[in-house]
Amino acid sequence: AQSVTQLGSHVSVSEGALVLLRCNYSSSVPPYLFWYVQYPNQGLQLLLKYTTGATLVKGINGFEAEFKKSETSFHLTKPSAHMSDAAEYFCAVSGVKAAGNKLTFGGGTRVLVKP
Amino acid sequence: DAGVIQSPRHEVTEMGQEVTLRCKPISGHNSLFWYRQTMMRGLELLIYFNNNVPIDDSGMPEDRFSAKMPNASFSTLKIQPSEPRDSAVYFCASGPGNSYEQYFGPGTRLTVT
């Protein structure tokens, strides 16, 4: 079965500082991996995804993530935090194809950006 | 292009009443997902459809919950009778069948008093 662990339910960063959100996954098949962002009172929005190929993927708003198979990780980073990055971030992993195209989501990490 | 549309955006009802949440997926998408989000339990997948057929309803909490997808452009999630513990934000998401990507609607905030 697939599972996702996001280390830290809350992260506080200063404006301009590095944002690092950790995601580790478990999968019985080669995974597709996703990061979603949820702003207050909105639905989840796709930030970036890894399917195959290059292991460093870039997304919207300056975020990027690196797939590391040996570490079963897909950490999300942004070099310089902006106040508008305050939101909740969810990591997700795909399932076994025979089970359909559902995703398994992590518990989320809420990011607070301090001025 | 319009995204996923959900209605109503907010619903306040009394315990015991029937509640119906509605979703219109993105045109051309053939997968549809219903999620529930609460502070205590986070984001939970309730049920999902592929080509209008329910594939996995193992997340539906109990028989009070039911979901239908009569055609490719409409789905409902019904709670009958509703209880205060059903209070949550309910999201609908859709996705193209050849991909795992999901596109979320704005959600329906349900409050059961």
Image (cartoon, coloured by chain):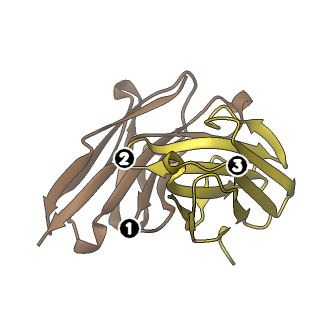
Chain colours: A brown, B yellow
Provide the chain ID for the residue under circle 3: B
Distance from Cα at disc 2 to Cα at disc 3: 30 Å
Left or right: residue A115 compared with residue A86: left
Distance from Cα at disc 2 to Cα at disc 1: 13 Å
User: Circle 1 is placed at which residue position?
Assistant: A40
Compared with residue A72, is residue B18 higher up or lower down, i.e. above or below?
Answer: below
Q: Amino acid at mark 2?
A: Gly
Q: Amino acid at mark 3?
A: Gln
Provide the chain ID for the residue under circle 1: A
Q: Which mark is residue A108?
A: 2
Q: Which mark is residue B80?
A: 3
Is the residue at mark 2 from the same chain as the one at mark 3?
Answer: no
Residue A107 screen position, x and y as percent: 39, 41
Provide the chain ID for the residue under circle 2: A
Task: Name the secondary structure under disc 3.
Answer: loop
Q: Amino acid at mark 1?
A: Pro
Rendered image quadrant of residue B1: bottom right
Observer-nearest residue: A68 or B89?
A: B89
Quadrant where the C terminus of chain A sits is bottom left
Quadrant where the N terminus of chain A sits is top right
Q: Residue at x 28, y 47 (%)?
A: A21
